[in-house]
Image (cartoon, rainbow, N blue to C red):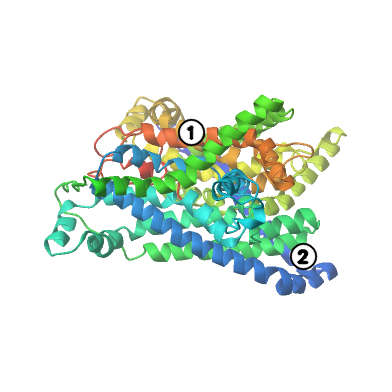
Amino acid sequence: MTGAAPALSFTRNARGLAWGAAGLALCVLVLSPVVALMVAAGEGAGDAAGGALWPHLVAHVLPQALRDTALLLAGVGVLVIALGAGSAWLVAAYDFPGRRLLEAGLLLPMAVPTYIVAFAYLDLLHPIGPVQTTLRDLLGYARPRDLVLPEIRSLPGCILLLGFVLYPYVYLPTRALFLMQAANLIEAARMLGRSPSGTFLRVALPMARPAIALGASLALMEALNDIGAAEFLGVRTLTVQVYATWVNRSDLAGAAQIALVMLVAVVALVAVERWARSGRGFAGTAQRPRRLARQRLSGPRAWAALALGLVPVAIGFAIPASYLAHAALRRVLRSGLPETILPEIGYTLLYAGIATLLAAALGFVVAAGPRLVARRWGEALIRVASLGYALPGAILAIGLLGPLALADTALSAGTTQLFGIAPALIGLGTGGALVTAYLVRFLAVSIGTCEAGLARVPRSLPDAGRMLGRGPGATLWRVQFPLAWPAVLSGALLVFVDCVKELPATLLLRPLNVETLATHLYGEAARGTYEDGTVAALLIVAVGLVPVVILLRLGTPRPEAGPERAGAGVKPAGPATEPADQRLTPLRP
């Protein structure tokens, strides 16, 4: 027995050291893009060309980019809060014919990436497109210039489209919080003479501020990350300027300097979100709160509520999806499938699939860290590994160039010295760079789902496994993984969908002569050949429906349950589970 104790201690130390080394490597992978971005920006400012470029950027590029970005974020923020919180209160506080279908339909815009919505509306609202052509025929106008409608290719148009696509980020957590509010608070406001609008503005909305702040920050992160919609609609945001400076002007240093300014904007968004959520804790009663009873609407009020709720569904999903389906069918019947569509599907599935497998495996291991090693270090690794989700794709792509180049150089030097041969590149110029970007950016989604799935496993089960002689790793694999695999699978599906839809990182890091569905669509829109890109757009929308289907299959959230860590994707296992909305809304750190 005396010899067994040192052996067990040695095994634990070795396991902790191995996990710590792997965790340190993962932290380096996640943090290296930010460090490399700062280095590249500093080197660009230090040399002659970069030193001359920075004043040019400050004088001619950054003012417009900062102005357009700030106005875009402000407009999108106001719109997503109004649409998300308003629609959440509508389906949570009122009952009317079609409410259950509307409750599900309000999630559908999540399936359509922002650049696809812009792509669809640019063709729909073109001066010679179907909408204006039909209006001219009805009104008797012969020429396009006889009927001039507001231009969709503008900053207000971009704000409008992004707002109607991104509002579900606010709708999901806010609706869950409204359903968890105790009925006596709302009823007390009504008994004190508050009107329905006064109850919403003075009672329900202030209590929902943490959820609104969280959802709005996620929506603004997506708006900041967007490159396709902004460029299609003529808005010169920071992300668009990063792409233009690097690709069109071949100026990596200038792109890094703009990306660094963009990183400051990301930090500011996170800080504002944390401030908006601070100091907003509400205590409930010791007893289980009674569920908020919906007010029954009938007659014209019921139909008005349904029509009002259908507006964001129509603009954000139904109209662009219908257009894509019709245009894609017409394209296939007339000319067949595009010749390049099958290789593009293959490349999309290949890169997204590899990144998904890596993210699922690493996410499960990282989420299990607090159960394998010291809890404090495990939770610290979770926080660091989740930072990549806060980095827009353009920043991540610029920041990965330096670390990947160093890795290729080190590998080439090492293999040349050992074996006398230099391997082909595995980072820059290959799919490895794109897979790495996907992994760093979306690892937080997998970690969140796996972490919440493991939290469902009673601690008595792994303890029983250890008492039967199983080590922590064996217990994790043989006991906890079989119970948490629905969460792992849900996280993997969400990562896969995010990889398929990601445009900025794919544009900047894809291998030469390789097109994915997203980059093919971007190219067709840039050339103005919208109909040729509809097949790729429709396929991306079909993939984007996966997380919406998952949300719908999870059922109606339970307002009596207490909220836990957001990001899980496992089906409720009992009365103490958190609302489904919060489980599938991955949080940015």
Q: Quadrant of residue 43?
A: bottom right
**Which residue is located at x 53 percent, y 38 percent?**
321
Task: Choose between 358 and 237: the one closer to the eye.
Answer: 237
Q: Residue most toward the front?
A: 140
- The three-letter code of the residue at mark 1 reads Val
Q: Residue most toward the right?
A: 420
Question: CA–CA distance between discs 2 and 1?
Answer: 43 Å
Task: Choose between 460 and 491: the one closer to the eye.
Answer: 491
**Which residue is located at x 52 percent, y 66 percent?**
268
Q: Quadrant of residue 278?
A: bottom left
Q: Give residue 248's position: percent from left, percent from top.
A: 79, 55
The residue identified by callout 1 is: 546
Above or below, 405 relative to 160: above
Task: Choose between 352 and 192: the one closer to the eye.
Answer: 192
Element at label 2? helix
Element at label 1? helix
The residue identified by callout 2 is: 43
Q: Give residue 516's position: percent from left, percent from top.
A: 68, 36
Task: Choose between 398 and 475: the one closer to the eye.
Answer: 398
Return the disc, 2 or 1, that comes first in the chain's sequence.
2
User: Can residue 221 be seen at all in this image of the molecule?
Assistant: yes
**Which residue is located at x 34 percent, y 41 percent?**
103
How many tags in the picture? 2
Side of 153 relative to 563 (left or right): right
